[in-house]
């Protein structure tokens, strides 16, 4: 669906900054409903997924890079974590690019959206950015990768399974360094929790705009408990995430008439 | 070389400053460079320069200066870094760093190794040798890039050579701590 076909209000500039540079091969859209969302089980869906993941990994790399440049006075340990994340996300991007080409696809074959980068552009502090990018986006990605790994193995797609396996190990490290940094900062000054809360609220508002029309109707998988614990979430935090995920999935199933 | 521990720390701290500067420059270039292949090229190398900074920063602590301490280079060399970092074209960025600046930086690391006492200063030498080992891989990545994106060319063909000439002209790259402090106070 092209943007001109939609009658949606423009994205709120208070919630979305400028997008990253993309070469002319890419068609950049703003919201989920403007992407090509094929149903599960269709051949196009697998292809489009590789292309979407390739662009998302690129956005995550761009976010880590921007934070590295924007906060030169942050602790060296967290800056090192961001630098490592840049390199890891670059490898993930290359990996999906390689898979896409090997399976007959090409860069620019499907439209993409850069909402992750645009949302983080409206968060002006490192704690808030890490809370949103590493503790929320990456943690959700960890859940998705855990499910996708099992799915790829069940299908006998060993190449894809190996990709997810390696990516999952990297994501655990990215979440952990952010968790370590955030917890240390909170211990020093609990008031910084306000920055995190503000960033998460902004993200929730922005998500509602990006995924209006069904983009959040994920009911297939829940929280990857073991991986999240490994990534530095406390058992209590994981318990809350599991409860929220179960409630959300139940609501989605009810809405879609799947119960 | 016959330098004091403090002078050695100043050189190592300056090398660290340069590594951090290059890490940050690549980080700034990633979202603002359009081509996927160039973005991931820069993205992988951010971590290389971060590791170099980290190794050098551990060494500054051993040389009786603070851990992870950086010393801003002499003004002339800083201007070279800033000029290189100011490139906006994809190939100007890539070639300005790899063909313009890095051969000069490599020469400075080799010069340090050649002039220091390898036994007294062995930990610094080992760090610089590890960095030079990485530089070989970075050079190979740069040499392979035109095959990945043969359509990307320099809009300003003389750019890398100009950066190289600017860098070569700056023989003194280490500023004194007093001068660096004065500059920091003034800014």
Image (spheres, grey):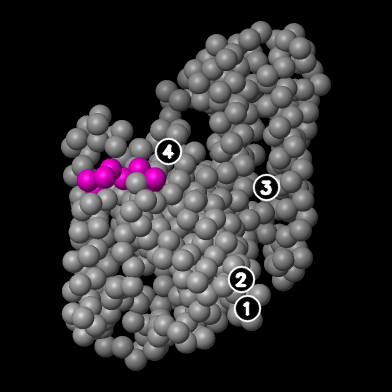
Q: Earlier in the sequence, mark 2 or mark 4?
A: 4
Q: Quadrant of the N terminus of chain A?
A: bottom left
* Marked residue chain, label 1: A
Q: Residues within 10 Å of mark 3 (few under 14, many from 20)?
A: many
Q: Which residue is mark 1?
A: A103
- The stretch of residues the image draws in magenta is A230-237
| Magenta-drawn stretch contains A236 | yes
Give the mark toward the camera: 4 or 3.
4
Q: Residue at x 77, y 22 (%)?
A: B113
Q: Which residue is mark 3?
A: B97
SS of the residue under disc 3? helix
| Magenta-drawn stretch contains A61 | no
Labelled pair 4, 3 in contact (Cβ < 8 Å): no
Q: Which residue is mark 2?
A: A99
Q: Position of residue A258 (x, y in %)?
A: 24, 83
Q: Are marks 3 and 2 on the same chain?
A: no
- Distance from disc 3 to disc 2, alpha carbons, whole Å, reads 30 Å
Question: Image check: A244 left or right of A92?
Answer: left
Q: Quadrant of the C terminus of chain A?
A: bottom left
Q: Which residue is mark 4?
A: A78
- Distance from disc 4 to disc 1, alpha carbons, whole Å, reads 37 Å
Q: Residue at x 61, y 17 (%)?
A: B9
């Amino acid at each position: 669906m092209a943007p001109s076909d939609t009658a949606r209000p423009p994205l709120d500039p208070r919630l979305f900054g400028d997008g990253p540079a993309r070469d002319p091969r890419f068609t950049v859209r703003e919201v989920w409903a403007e992407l090509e969302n094929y149903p599960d089980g269709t051949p196009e869906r697998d292809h489009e997924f590789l292309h979407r993941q390739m662009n998302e990994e690129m956005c995550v790399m761009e976010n880590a890079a921007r934070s590295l440049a924007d906060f030169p006075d942050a602790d060296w340990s967290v800056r090192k974590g961001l630098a490592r994340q840049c390199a890891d996300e670059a490898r993930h991007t290359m990996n999906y690019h390689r898979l896409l080409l090997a399976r007959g696809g090409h860069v620019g074959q499907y439209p993409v959206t850069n909402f992750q980068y645009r949302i983080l552009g409206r968060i002006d502090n490192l704690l808030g950015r890490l809370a949103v990018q590493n503790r929320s986006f990456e943690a959700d990605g960890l859940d998705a990768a855990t499910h996708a790994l099992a799915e790829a193995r069940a299908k006998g797609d060993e190449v894809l399974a190996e990709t997810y396996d390696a990516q999952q190990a990297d994501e655990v490290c990215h979440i952990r360094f952010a968790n370590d940094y955030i917890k240390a900062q909170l211990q020093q000054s609990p008031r910084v929790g306000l920055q995190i809360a503000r960033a998460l609220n902004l993200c929730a508002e922005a998500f509602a705009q990006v995924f209006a029309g069904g983009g959040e109707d994920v009911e297939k998988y829940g929280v990857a408990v073991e991986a999240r614990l490994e990534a530095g979430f406390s058992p209590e935090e994981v318990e809350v995430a599991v409860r929220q995920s179960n409630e959300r999935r139940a609501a989605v199933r009810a809405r879609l008439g799947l119960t | 070389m016959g330098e004091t521990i403090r002078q050695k720390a100043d050189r190592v701290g300056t090398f660290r400053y340069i590594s951090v500067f290059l890490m940050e420059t690549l980080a700034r270039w990633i979202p603002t460079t359009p081509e996927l292949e160039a973005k991931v090229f820069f993205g992988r190398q951010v971590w290389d320069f971060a590791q170099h900074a980290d190794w050098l920063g551990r060494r500054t602590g051993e040389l009786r200066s603070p851990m992870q301490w950086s010393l801003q280079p002499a003004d002339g060399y800083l201007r070279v870094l800033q000029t290189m970092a100011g490139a906006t074209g994809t190939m100007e960025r890539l070639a300005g760093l790899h063909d313009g600046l890095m051969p000069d930086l490599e020469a400075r690391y080799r010069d340090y190794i050649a002039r220091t006492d390898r036994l007294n200063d062995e930990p610094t030498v080992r760090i610089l040798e590890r960095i030079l080992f990485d530089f070989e891989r970075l050079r190979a990545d740069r040499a392979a890039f035109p095959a990945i994106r043969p359509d990307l060319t320099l809009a300003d063909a003389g750019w890398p050579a100009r950066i190289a000439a600017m860098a070569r002209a700056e023989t003194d790259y280490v500023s004194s701590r007093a001068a660096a402090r004065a500059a920091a106070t003034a800014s």
